[in-house]
Every structure is written in C-alpha cells, then in structure tokens.
Image: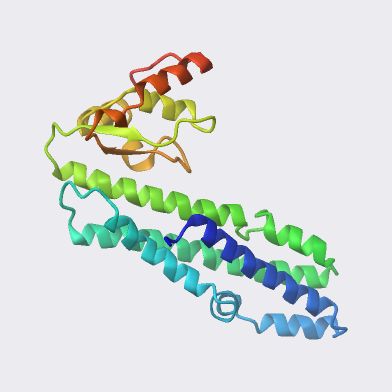
Amino acid sequence: MAYSSERFANKYEEALNRIASLYSSSIASGVNTNDILVAIGNIDFKDLFENQLGFNTELENVANSYLDALRNMDGFADVDETILRSLVQSDLNIYRSKFNDTYVHMKSLFTESVINGLPREAFVDQLTKGQFGVLSKFQAESLYTDSLQKFNRSVIKQMAKNAPADLLYVFNGPIDTRTSNTCMQILAAGPMTLSQIENRFPGTFENGGHFNCRHQFRRFTQKGMYKQNKIEKVFEKRNLTQRTSL
C-alpha cells in the first residue's frame, strides 16, 4: 500500500500524543519542579521524537515517496539526474528545517508549561493546534501533500522544457466545491503549449493555482482529460466569466 499524507499525519499525531503523555506523567510525578526542569533541559527533543518515538521511520518514508512519484510519472521527456536529485534534496531540507524548528518550540512549550503549572488539557491544546511553533497534524499533512505536488509539477515542467515546443498540456485535477475560482480559470483554458501557459498563467505550471493546490498540468493525450462540460456547469453556477489570464 502506497504511503500517504494521511498516514504521515496520523503517525505525527501519535508522536505528539506521546509527548503529551510524557508531560502528564512529569507533572503528576510529585517530583520537584526544579528537578523536572533540569531533566527537560537534558532531553534532546529531536532524538526523543525521531529515534525514541520512531518518527524517523516516517521521514524515511517521505523520502521514498519521491522515488514512488517518479516511478508513477508519465515520463514523456528526459530530465537531468542532477536536477532530480536537487529537487528532492531541496524538499527534504524543508522538512528538516520545519521539524527542527518544531523540536525547539516543543521543548520551549514543555518547559514553560511546567513552570506555569499548565494542566495536561491546556498543554495538549497548545501542543496540537499549531499556534506555538509546533506543527499541527493538519500542517504536517499539508506539508507532505503540497511538497509532493510541487515536486511532481517541477519535474513535469522540466520534462516540458525538454519536449517538443508544440506539445500540449492540460490542467488536471478535481472539479468540486473545493476547487478555487483561480483553478477553474486555468482548467477552463483547456489544452495549451508550455509557452501559452507561461504567457497566460505564469508560475502555475510549477506552483499550481495556490498553496495546497490539488491540480497540475499533465501532457494532453486524450480528449477526456479536458472536462469542458463539467467546467462550463461550474462557471454557470458560480457566475464566472472566462478570462485570458489571471
């Protein structure tokens, strides 16, 4: 079974819950606050979270997800191996940066909560809501989804640059209540060459319509990829007018 953003987020949440349990046992232990603070000061939260709680396995699964994405991709043109490695490493560096920041904020939150005598419920609320520098479950899931989507778009863009200039691409993805008006405009444009996309919708080939966008350009290989009737119904329902650019 393929690794997924849902599994990544659930495993992250499990690790957060174990941090919450550690906090609960610490404040209920009857140990002097100063002694608890000394113990916290000696904890490497990165080692705790990744090695002792096993989250490092999930980070390894993230790296493998990029290899799976390449295997499942429509390889219609060559991409230099150095570029592929750089794209993967760039994303993995972002993960490392995000989680290193989370560990710093997690330790700070843990320490301040002990000092202030914060009840377990209040600590859990601050730990899991993404408001104190610690990634929330939702933010972790979004990080996985958006990073992999952007990687796919970037690789397809590199293939498009090496493919014949007259090759056509179509914006592909869900058409539902969550689809933004921006994405609807790009979807409505239909099949376009790379040059036409860059002129009409600059930056969207590699970035999509917005953060966490569920769409991407794909090589246009069959008429069914352009959902014209469905798009027109959405335009009518939302009272949209098709534009030539964003």
> Is residue 71 in view?
yes
Residue 171 is situated, as x and y percent measured from the top left of the image, at 33, 33
- Residue 227, percent across and down? 36, 26
Which is nearer the eye, 32 or 216?
216
Residue sitting at x 33%, y 49%: 152
| x 79%, y 78%: residue | 25
Q: In the visual, does 171 lie left or right of 193? A: right
Residue at figure coordinates x 77%, y 64% from the top left: 123
In which quadrant of the rendered image does the N terminus lie?
bottom left
Can you say which quadrant of the picture contains the C terminus? Answer: top left
Q: Is residue 18 left or right of residue 93?
A: right
In the figure, residue 177 lies in which quadrant? Answer: top right
Q: How does the figure colour the protein chain or chains? A: rainbow
Residue 203, visible in the rendered structure: no
Image coordinates for residue 19, horizontal then vertical, percent: 69, 72
Q: Residue at x 11, y 38 (%)?
A: 164
Count of numbered marks: 0
Decide if residue 172 is on the left or right side of residue 27: left
Query: Relative to the observer, which residue lies in front, 147 or 33?
Result: 147
Quick one: 100 or 185, which is closer to the camera? 185
Relative vertical location of residue 162 with respect to residue 7 in this rendering, above or below? above
Residue 154 left/right relative to 121: left
Q: Position of residue 138 (x, y in %)?
A: 59, 52
Q: Residue furthest left?
A: 164
Which one is nearer the viewer's eye here, 4 or 130?
4
